[in-house]
Image: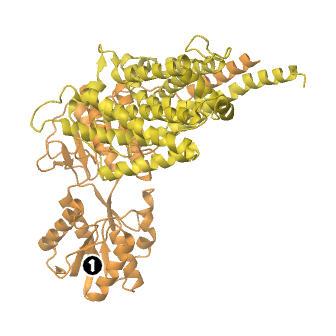
Chain colours: A yellow, B orange
Amino acid sequence: MMTKYAGKKPGFFSRVDQHVLRLLLVMAVWMVFMALTRASRFYTLINFQTMASQFPEFGLMSLGVMLCMITGGIDLSPVGVANLTAILMALVLKQLTPAVGGSLPIYAIPLVFLLGAAIGACLGVLNGLLVSKVRIPPILATLGMSELLTGVSIVITNGAAVSGLPVEYAMTVNSKIGALVPVQLVIFACMAIIVWFLLNRTTFGTKIYLLGTNPQAARFSGLKNDRLIISTYIISGITAALGGLVMLANYNSARANYGGVYVLQCILVVVLGGVSPTGGKGRISGVVLAIVLLRMLETGINRFPQISSYYISLIWGGVLLLVMVLDYFSNGRRYLRWKRKMPF
Amino acid sequence: MKRTFSLILAMLMVLSLASFAHAQEKDWEIVVVPKDASNPWFVRMKVGVDEYAKETGLNAYQKGTAEIDATLQAQLVQDLIAQGVDAICVVPVNPESLEPVLKQAMDAGIVVIAHEGASLQNVDYDIEAFSNAGYGAFIMDNLAEAMGKEGLYTTMVAHVTNASHNEWADAGVAHQKAAYPNMTLLEEEVRVESEDNGDVAYNKAKELFKKYPELKGVMGTSSYDAPGVARAIEELGLVGKVFTSGTGMPADNKALLESGVVRSLTLWDPALAGKAMISLAVKVLNGDTIEAPIDLGVEGYTGLTFKEGSELVLEGQGWIVINKDNVDSFGF
């Protein structure tokens, strides 16, 4: 067990930091605005259920990207991993379907999730090896990986969609537990809790924060940096694969080019969530809030026929900059005050 | 200071956004979802949708995603379902990924009309601008007029394996045999491949004109065929002696049309397709019985008939001619 370094251990909600407060403020502003203008159409059960079934796709991928960014790296391959996994699992599901009339065997869905996660883990190992052993900068290694995986997906499918899947899979993942909670949300919540546990209740979490803060200090402290990096990319591969499996269910088909916009969305969400792009800093509460905020913004904007979709990227960019400016105003000032107190 | 600053920013945000939003209530809310919002083809569709909404006073509007992406489109449709709109008219990016979402819409009692999504199952109706046979005959009419209804001609397709191109070409030849007895098909080479490439079309045409000096016309099908052939006609100095017609995009071929190398190209107009979708959605919402032929009151969509063997796919006569007079009016 590593000793806890004082005051650095972030809790889930126990010690809400300034950044999370600021995200909550932006979210509250948006919710008040929606209440004032579109209350009857935004505050409905079905609307919240729809949003809760939409964000897990890129939310799952963002969790992995977040871990990589905490180590000081980045993962640009989640969409590539997700699509390849979805395509392979779609083919498996088709194989498992009896030729005539029968339904999917009961073990099929757990099997697909296990196999999918395993594929994600394998691809994560590859990413991790490229980053740690071959020492390719993470941004290039994972970008190359993303292109490679998309290429493999296109070769497997000839660029067409794999469809005609048994309905049971999509129905199971698309259903709502107790007619209320979407299954996609449950999958996302489980993964989020696992990642929270890893970051805050295990030495692994403490180690990757240290690794991200200062890799040299980490090495001299006796950490096995390479092994840590590989583990991180494995987790990222698994979350991306799960994102792919949710996409497979949502669209009941898989294709090499689904979710192309998610790569940038994931990075936007993670940075918006307060994870430092240089590593070593970031909380899951911030990232989860940012994921929900992003979805609420997009859904909210879709409520206004007059507002063109061009504004969505404008507003995302605006929100990102706004949060960072607010960050500067508090952190920057505190930093200056602290600096002034220093004797030299 | 910080708190005041945040508060001011927050208030500014609410105020500036509130200026966008002024709700207008009308009986039905009909939304057209194109593949994206910025592609000139769908910008043209929006022109039609806005025009139609203004003419009829309907609460109909087009809402597209910022880029062409199957997942974004599906999520937009999901949002519209949650919002409880009355009808969704959609041009699918990818039919497979939209099926489960459109099923949700149908289950929620929303009228679903598609365009260029003939394979979709979870729709009330799908509107196609035309039947393949009708469009082929239309191209032939244009070619025949340019050729003076006489002379030797051949047909060009992207690939002989391309289903729709070959149906157009077959229909064109059949129409020539029925309507233009003084025209003859070049028996030695009845179908030339352009490989969906303007340069290949150009080279193939040059070869053809050298090999068969009496050849007077080429019927194009892919949007690269007629423009490629026209370049060959111009270069070999055959303007006024040899003619071509076929599918082509207006802006790309402005120079060819204005210089008279090509008299007319053929196409369908997304603005009219947008109007037709809304008009059909209104009919379905009204509970009108939908029986062929259907008159949607939109040019080219006044006698829609069901595609053979389908109860969902409707075909119109929505083809249009592009010539030097109207080439600037489309915006793409």
Q: Position of residue A121 (x, y in %)?
A: 41, 35
Q: Is residue B197 above or below residue B277?
A: below
Residue at (42% x, 38% y) in the render: B63
Q: Is residue A55 left or right of residue A16?
A: left
Name the residue nearer the viewer: A169 or B256.
A169
Residue B109: tell me if it is visible. no
Tell me the residue that label 1 is attached to: B217
Report the residue at 62% width, 12% height from top. A15
The image position of residue B293, as x and y in percent, is: 15, 47
* Vertical relation: A158 (above or below) A22: below
Residue A256, placed above or below residue B259: above
Q: Residue furthest top?
A: A14
> Which of the two residues, A174 or A239, is positioned nearer the viewer here?
A239
Which residue is more in the foreground, A232 or A242? A232
Q: Amino acid at mark 1?
A: Gly
Residue at 27 percent of width and 79 percent of height = B217
In the figure, is residue A226 to the left or right of A146? right
| Chain where mark 1 sits | B
B128, above or below A34, in the image: below
